[in-house]
Amino acid sequence: MKITVETLRGWKGCRPFGALTAYDYPGARLLDEAGVPVLLVGDSLGMVVLGHPDTTAVTMDDIVHHLRAVARARGRALIGADLPYKAYETPAQAVCNARRLVEAGAEYVKAEGGQEILPQVRAILAEGIPFMGHLGMLPQHVVEEGGKYRIKGRDEAGRQRLLDDALALEEAGAFACVLELVTPPVAAEIRSVCSRMLTLGIGSGPDCDGQILVTHDLVGAFPWFTPKFVEPRVRTGESIRSAAQDWLASLIPNY
């Protein structure tokens, strides 16, 4: 059965679930066949696919290109995509770019921020496009924060800001929100106070409605860096390197 936003809403408080990033057709098809219910064409592709130091170089054209490939898998999973950096500066721009993502195959769109982007969120939702939020550590703002990925919600002011932002997104109509590098007690509190909006944790402890990871981190496909909160289940990068070396050795004497 096809997973929809309404399917996920029915899981709130009933069952945990997982979400993973996808950037191409075979990756999306494999994850869908594994039963992953939610896929995200994330702007993390800037780092793990395109080789940029952060997500801020990712463009709408980049996201659309990869989203079309993922959508060709035509599986059961709910497919969404990030609005990249500077792609939702105004409500009109947010709507225009959200429509582009839907036309390319997205069934929901995601953007970073809370109360400061509420006009954009409301405009997207007014178009009938499901919206997923993103609070806590915001990768698109990492340069503004000095290039450091900092845990959020450590003090009372940070906790209150996260709660206020989460409740504002829920009130606007967001069906889900990623909580990235939020202290686990605050992530658990957000899940508790948001009775309708699902929370998806990444490096924010176990007490969210679901968990989301960058697939390359989960399968060790980007061996040069792995976040501290991820334990790769396989070491794909090492296997690829080893397979290439073995193949070359079979062709070249004394390789």
Image (cartoon, rainbow, N blue to C red):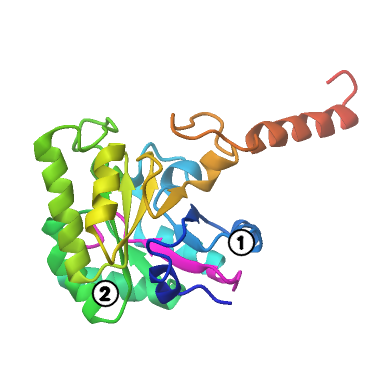
**Place of residue 34 in the rendered image (x, y in percent of width and height, measured from the top left):** 65, 58
| Quarter assignment of residue 186 | top left
Image disc number at residue 96: 2
Q: Residue drawn at (54%, 70%), measured in percent from left and top?
A: 71
Residue 239 sits inside the magenta stretch: no
- Prevailing secondary structure of the magenta residues: loop
Q: Residue at x 55, y 41 (%)?
A: 218
Q: What span is in magenta?
A: 71-89
| Depth order, front residue of 118/93 | 118
Quadrant that contains the N terminus: bottom right
45 vs 157, left or right, is: right
What is the three-letter code of the residue carrying label 1? Gly
At 46% from the left edge and 40% from the top edge, which residue is drawn?
A: 51
Tell me which amino acid carries mark 2.
Answer: Cys
x%, y% of residue 252? 87, 27
Q: Position of residue 92 (x, y in %)?
A: 17, 73
